[in-house]
Amino acid sequence: MIGTGLIGTSIALAMRERGAEVVLADRDAAALAMAVELGAGTALPADGPVDEPADVAVLAVPPAAVAVTLLDAQKRGLAAVYTDVASVKALPLRQARELGCELGTFVPGHPLAGRERSGPAAARADLFLGRSWALCPPPETEPEAVEAVTALARACGAEPVTVGAEEHDRAVALVSHAPHVVSAAVAARLTGADDMALGLAGQGLRDVTRIAAGDPKLWIGILTGNAQPVADVLEAVATDLAVAASLLRDGSERAAAHVADLLLRGNAGCSRIPGKHGGDPSAYAVVQVVIPDRPGELAMIFQAAGVAGVNIEDVRIEHSPGRPLGVLEISVKPEAARRLAEELRSRGWSVPGLA
Ligand SMILES: NC(=O)c1ccc[n+]([C@@H]2O[C@H](COP(=O)([O-])OP(=O)(O)OC[C@H]3O[C@@H](n4cnc5c(N)ncnc54)[C@H](O)[C@@H]3O)[C@@H](O)[C@H]2O)c1
Ligand SMILES: O=C(O)C(=O)C[C@]1(C(=O)O)C=C[C@@H](O)C=C1
């Protein structure tokens, strides 16, 4: 593993859980030491060739560092197969080609999972469970190399998806990169907000701005590395926003109907975002349980689900800090929803829906 930040350490931890031997490197000694301390693997000697090449070397460094890191790793003979995890794919591949890297053993990759925090301390072995992992091998890549990286992605619990580098970049401009900029633009409005306004912030603002907390240094590399596709999406979003603003100023009923059209298109777009397993999000039923803010409450609810023989597919907690109650939303197979609701009611919890 070269690069022991959030993604590199998360992959290393996931592979360690599956019993793999992992060797780690990072130019930042503190990041490397933390990853070793977390049990992600052992440190690779700083330079020179290695006695025994690894099966796969993962380059988990910023997009602009991928090609030079690949060249260096290949010169050292670190592994049989190489992959990276950068959020953009055409740029590192083009740079790798220009630098004369060996492309037969290189499988550009991108796990579609992450966090708004950087560094090894934020790493999680379960980060990739149920997520897509894009693989963008160029024509030169050997099938055995693709197979090895496919197996790595699967071992981390992800679902490999093979796609061309340019097509990948256009897709993530829409589903990841432009949304990041939009989130940042909303959050940026808050810098001058007064404390009273900020005190009124609810979950909506937190949902829209979570990713805006991401590392600007990493993100500027991602955005400039995928500039044209991101700019295309941002221009379309900006047009929608400008039209909505001028319609709201207009204030007429006809104008309100046009704004409502944007909101309806928003609903339609939301409903197209796949659920946890990449399937139809409506495939699960949601059981809502009112929970008192007491220690042990969640454990008891999960135990009750186990007693009822109900597999929990996903959970989410809605609660306003400082309030004594919250709502636990448990996603289950539709046929199990009523059984779970009855079990929870029989144990004294309030389950308002599913009469
Ligand atoms: N953060 C996310 O949500 C996310 C998700 C998927 C993919 N990615 C991609 O994963 C890669 C790593 O991102 P991260 O979030 O783990 O960042 P990070 O900042 O947590 O970690 C990056 C690590 O790479 C190291 N590094 C930088 N240049 C290096 C070099 N030349 N040689 C060796 N080490 C070097 C840094 O010291 C750092 O420890 C990026 O390419 C990013 O686009 C990020
Ligand atoms: O969930 C987050 O915090 C992320 O930023 C993850 C996210 C994404 O947009 O989904 C961000 C960039 C990566 O390349 C892959 C995943």
Image (cartoon, grey):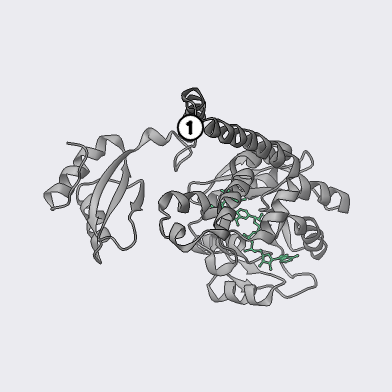
Q: Quadrant of residue 237?
A: top right
The spot of residue 243 in percent (x, y) is 60, 31
Q: Is residue 333 left or right of residue 46?
A: left
Camera-nearest residue between 39 and 165: 165
The answer, for residue 25, to whether it is visible in the render is yes
Assign a secondary structure to mark 1.
Answer: helix
x 20%, y 43%: residue = 352
Residue type at numbered disc 1: Leu
x 26%, y 45%: residue = 288
Q: Quadrant of residue 142?
A: top right
Q: Quadrant of the N terminus?
A: bottom right
Q: Quadrant of the C terminus?
A: top left
Camera-nearest residue between 254 and 91: 254
According to the picture, the residue beneath numbered tag 1 turns out to be: 263
Residue positioned most to the top? 254
The answer, for residue 82, to whether it is visible in the render is no
Give the answer, above or below, for where 318 lies relative to 24.
above
Give the answer, above or below, for where 189 lies relative to 1.
above
Q: Is residue 352 left or right of residue 131?
A: left
Q: Quadrant of residue 322?
A: bottom left
The spot of residue 163 in percent (x, y) is 66, 37
The spot of residue 152 in percent (x, y) is 59, 52
